[in-house]
Image (cartoon, rainbow, N blue to C red):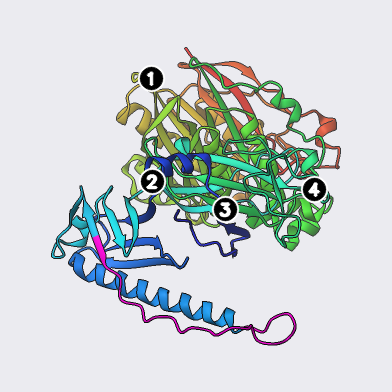
Amino acid sequence: MWRLPGSRAALRGVRTAVGRHTRAEAATETAAGAMERAVVRCVPSEPKLSLSFALADGSHKNMQRDQSEPLGRALSRIATNALKGHAKAAAAKKSRKNRPNASGGACAGPVSEPAAACEPVVKLYYREEAVAEDVLNVDAWQDGAVLQIGDVKYKVERNPPAFTELQLPRYIMAGFPVCPKLSLEFGDPANSLFRWYKEAKPGAAEPEGGSPSSLSPSSPFPSWTETGVNERVYTPSNADIGLRLKLHCTPGNGQRFGPSRELESVCPVEAGPGTCTFDQRHLYTKKVTDDSLIRTVSYNLLADTYAQTEFSRSVLYPYCAPYALELDYRQNLIQKELTGYNADLICLQEVDRNVFTDSLVPALEAFGLEGVFRIKQHEGLATFYRKTKFTLLSQHDISFHEALESDQLHKELLEKLVLYPSAQERVLQRSSVLQVSVLQSTKDSSKRICVANTHLYWHPKGGYIRLIQMAVALAHIRHVSCDLYPGIPVIFCGDFNSTPSTGMYHFAVNGSIPEDHEDWASNGEEERCNMSLTHVFKLKSACGEPAYTNYVGGFHGCLDYIFIDSNALEVEQVIPLPSHEEVTTHQALPSVSHPSDHIALVCDLKWK
């Protein structure tokens, strides 16, 4: 049967190899009458189609042909390739016969010259009738057609499910979920098959009958044993420490399966850090909530672009072990923490683009969540939602400075700000953004919700900038939740870089801020910009006012909030934050047991 090439190649830290067929493939082969496989990929948006098959000599052919080309030309090219393959096989056979034997002499016996090969007959049949050679490739290569090359027949599979991307994480730890990154064409993960293997320990006995992926003890390649896990995600145990993992995947779409792929981890499983700050919290979130609740998470992840600086290592987090600031290490903790909350909504800040695509999407998708991303400058915001509970209706993201300058919603605010040129310049220099997603319940289409996510300006003296950013955010959210989708409730998550004593927090929960508030002069009299602001919402902090959500060597305080529309939502429960003892076990955050300098807020919300 047709297989992918067996060469082992490094691809972004993952070695890919092709192994034996799974039971699913065997069933497919039986149904196909044990016929060879010719895989055709043909999509309307591309000028060429691809054709892949294995010749009788064992070589594998990948051909690209114009969709508008007559079939006869493609068949002629196949015949030429088959003839070349036959010649190479004959030459190799002759070379082996002429190779010196063990005693140093040439092999005894005459060597007959191979007979000159004739170009094989190549035909394509559909429903047992030969396809005319003037038919265009796009119409000729139909699913279920039969390609005949000499005496060998191939079943044509047009656009079968196939992996276009498949990767394992580089750093794997015992007790932490391994979530492969994968992309499929003509298939979906839910209908694909997965089987996990681990290296057999040296000297371990072979399983009776041999594993489907085992190799003989004399083989230079490792021997593998099945883990018994046939799911997309595998969580290694302490027994796996020191062993590499292998994943065998067969893409499917609910009707058929495509060619299998295998991945081997580059590094063996390493020991985990022991107890983490979120382990106790997971005891409250073992199951997904019922449809009446919305488990919501807000979390600043600490962007890798900030963690991996000399300033961070020597000044901000000198107490943190250097390896615990490495992205590969932190991603393991972040994945385990987030997936363990079984959340319905997750709003994240300081998300590197590659972390979103390569780590968060594969991990959270495997646990039923889908996400959207908004870049800021070097990092951005991400919002994930549970697919069984919500569908994404629309997105309404903005950049604060662009919206303030160009959107008529903020005309009045801008007119106030232009009276203070120094303050205006500082405000318009900031790159902060607001991510707004409108979601609809999958169970009740009348239930919609506006989910906002932001990360306000960070500087300790930027209080007036945060006030103006918050005013822009709330005006925009009002437009979405009152004008575009009248009456839908609001959940507003983020790192607001504001403690409960600040003007920003006062403005959020009280609905107004007076022009004489001290934060209007947060950066001195030169940038003072007195103005009064109001908003229409009745917001409350769902998780209250914790002593801190950010705990570093030189500062600790509450900076993160989940603001909710108290007219439409109420708090069912707040998941307790880690104890002070847990947070300070390694002095401060981040640490070997906590991946960020912030602490996630987690609560269960209920529709009123």
Residue at the spot of label 4: 201
Visible residue check, residue 511: yes
The kind of secondary structure element at disc 1 is: loop
Point out the frontmost of discs 3 and 2: 3
Separation of marks 1 and 4 at Cα, in angstroms: 54 Å
Residue at the spot of label 3: 19
Q: Which amino acid does the dot numbered 1 rest on?
A: Lys
Residue in the image at 63% along x and 48% along y:
213
> From the viewer's perspective, is 367 left or right of 499?
left
Point out the frontmost of discs 1 and 4: 4
Sequence-first disc among 1 and 3: 3
Sequence-first disc among 1 and 2: 2
Sequence-first disc among 4 and 3: 3
Q: Which amino acid does the dot numbered 4 rest on?
A: Lys
Q: Is residue 348 above or below residue 145?
A: above
Separation of marks 4 and 2 at Cα, in angstroms: 72 Å
Q: Which amino acid does the dot numbered 2 rest on?
A: Glu
Residue 525 is covered by the magenta coloring: no
Frontmost residue, 141 versus 322: 141
Residue at the spot of label 2: 415
Magenta stretch, residue numbers: 99-123
> From the viewer's perspective, is 274 left or right of 504?
right
